[in-house]
Amino acid sequence: MSLYRQAESNTRKTWLYLSFFFVLIIALGWIISYYLETPVILYWAVGLSLFFNFFAYWYSDKMVLSISQAKPIEKQDNPELYRLVENLCLTAGLPLPKIYIIDSVQPNAFATGRDARHAVVAVTRGLLEKLERVELEGVIAHELAHIGNKDMLLQTVVVVLAGTVAMLTDFFFRISFRSNSRSNGKEGQVKLIMMFVSLALMILAPIIAQLIKMAISRKREYLADASGALLTRYPEGLARALEKISQDNNPLPSANNATSHLYIANPFRGSGSSWLNRVFLTHPPIEDRIKALRGMEV
C-alpha cells in the first residue's frame, strides 16, 4: 500500500472510531434519561463532554509539559536541532514550534499544543544522544506530522470522551442501585433488572471507550509514520530510529498514563507482546510500524 493510501485509510478509520465514540456517549445519556424519565441527563452528557473538550483545548499543552518535566530551549542552546526542525517545517509548510527537552536517557519524543501556531515538540536528551541525524530527522518529521494532522487536538478530545463515558456509567450505576434499594414488588423487580443492565454498562462501556481511544491512537501513529516518511522522503530513517528506541530499556521517570499515548513510542518498558497486551497498547507494536515503513512506496 502506498503512503497516500495508507494515510487516507487511517484518516477514514479514525473519524469512524470518533463518530462511534460520540454515539456511545449519546446512547448512554439517552438510557440514563429514559431510566430517570428526564431528557436533562442527555443534554448534560453532551454538554459536559463539550465543556471538558473546550477546557482541554486551551490548557492541555501546559499540563502535558508540566507532567513530562520538559524544559524549553532557545536556538543558541542547540543550534543543530533548531536547524533540523526549521528545515523540516519549511518543507512541511508549518510554523516553527517551540522546542522542549526532557532530561532523560530514554530516547523518546512527543508533540503537543492546541494548533500549529501554538505547537510544541519535546524530545528527550537520550534521543539527541543516541540517534544519527537521519534517524532524528525521521522522529522530528513524525512529530511535525502529528502537528500538521491536528492529532494533538484529536487525542485531547478522545481522552475527554473516554472520561465522560466513565463518569456517565458510574453515575448510572449509582442512581439505579439507589432506586432499586427504595423499591419493592413488581417495580422493584424492574428496577433490579435495570440495575443489572447498568452494571453491564458500567463494566463494558469504559472498556469499549478505552479500546476506541487506543484504536484511534494507534491509527494516528501509523498516519504520522506515513506522513513523516513523505516529508523526509526516507522511511528508513524513521524505521531505524524506531528500532533503536525499542531496544532501549531505560525508564522514563516522568512517564504518566495520562500522557503516554502522546510519545512516539510507549515510554513504559517491558509491557510484553502477548495478545492481551497488544490489544490494550496505545501504540502499534514497533515491529509492525517498522515493517509498514519498510514496505511503503514513497
Image (cartoon, rainbow, N blue to C red):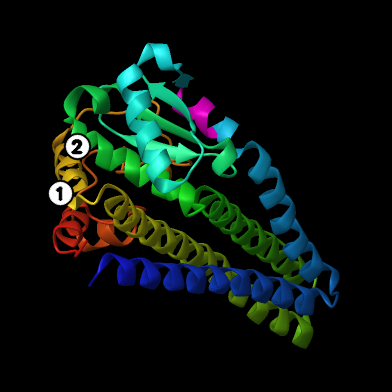
The image quadrant of residue 110 is top left
| Bounds of the magenta segment | 64-69
Q: Residue at x 34, y 55 (%)?
A: 227
Q: Residue at x 19, y 59 (%)?
A: 288
User: Where is 238 relative to 278, above or below?
Assistant: above
Q: Main secondary structure of the magenta part?
A: helix
What residue is disc 2 on?
134
Q: Is residue 293 magenta?
A: no
Q: Is residue 67 magenta?
A: yes
Decide which of 49, 205 is in the foreground and name it: 49
- Could you tell me residue 234's position as x and y percent? 20, 49
Instruction: Describe the element under mark 2 as helix, strand or loop.
Output: helix
Q: Earlier in the sequence, mark 1 or mark 2?
A: 2
Would you say residue 57 is visible in this rendering? yes
Please identify the quadrant where the C terminus is shown.
bottom left
- Could you tell me residue 9's position as x and y percent? 37, 73
User: Where is 4 relative to 233, above or below?
Assistant: below
- Could you tell me residue 232's position as x and y percent? 27, 47
Please identify the quadrant where the N terminus is shown.
bottom left
Instruction: Describe the element under mark 1 as helix, strand or loop.
Output: helix
